[in-house]
Amino acid sequence: MESVDQLAKKAIGLRPIDRIQLIEAILFSLDKPDPDIEKCWVAESEARYDAYKRGELEAIEWDKIQKGYQS
């Protein structure tokens, strides 16, 4: 297997458009959601929404959040 340095030297020798496509392919391979983390986020958002519907959690307007809302 080639080292990262060897691969980088080969990549640098590619045409610019091919380097861009290579970068996109590598980034795409890293940008896959973790199913366990996704499940946790879904459970958390559903729990928060349920708490809001029960009146246990207040909603905060977006403009207040942007201005640094302090509870």
Image (tube, rainbow, N blue to C red):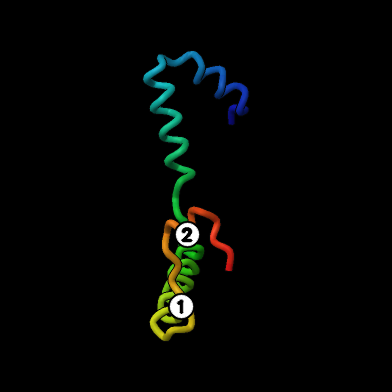
Residue, x 54% and y 61% (percent of image)? 69
Q: Residue at x 59, y 27 (%)?
A: 2
Residue at the image point whose x is 50% and y is 20% from the top: 11
Q: Quadrant of residue 5?
A: top right
Q: Which mark is in front, 1 or 2? A: 2
Point out residue 68 in the picture as x, y percentages from the top left corner: 55, 56
4 on left or right of 40: right
Q: What secondary structure is found at the residue carrying circle 2?
A: helix
**Amino acid type assigned to the residue bearing label 1 in the image:** Ala
**Contact, mark 1 vs mark 2 (Cβ under 8 Å):** no
Which residue is depicted at the point 48% across and 72% down? Answer: 44
Q: Nearer the viewer, residue 5 or 35?
A: 35
Label 1: element kind: helix
How far from the left and from the top, in percent, is residue 15? 40, 14
- Quadrant including the N terminus: top right
* Residue 21 image label: none
- Mark positioned earlier in the residue sequence (1 or 2): 1
Indicate the position of residue 22 as horizontal and vertical percent values: 43, 28
Determine whether 49 is above or below 16 in the image. below
Dot 1: few (<14), some (14–19), or many (≥20) neighbours within 10 Å? few
Residue named by callout 2: 64
Task: Say which amino acid is labelled 2.
Answer: Lys
When the figure is inspected, residue 54 is found, relative to residue 19, above or below; the finding is below
Q: Quadrant of residue 42?
A: bottom left
Q: Can you name the residue that lies furthest to the bottom here?
A: 54
The percent coordinates of residue 66 (x first, y second) are 48, 53
Q: Which mark is residue 47?
A: 1
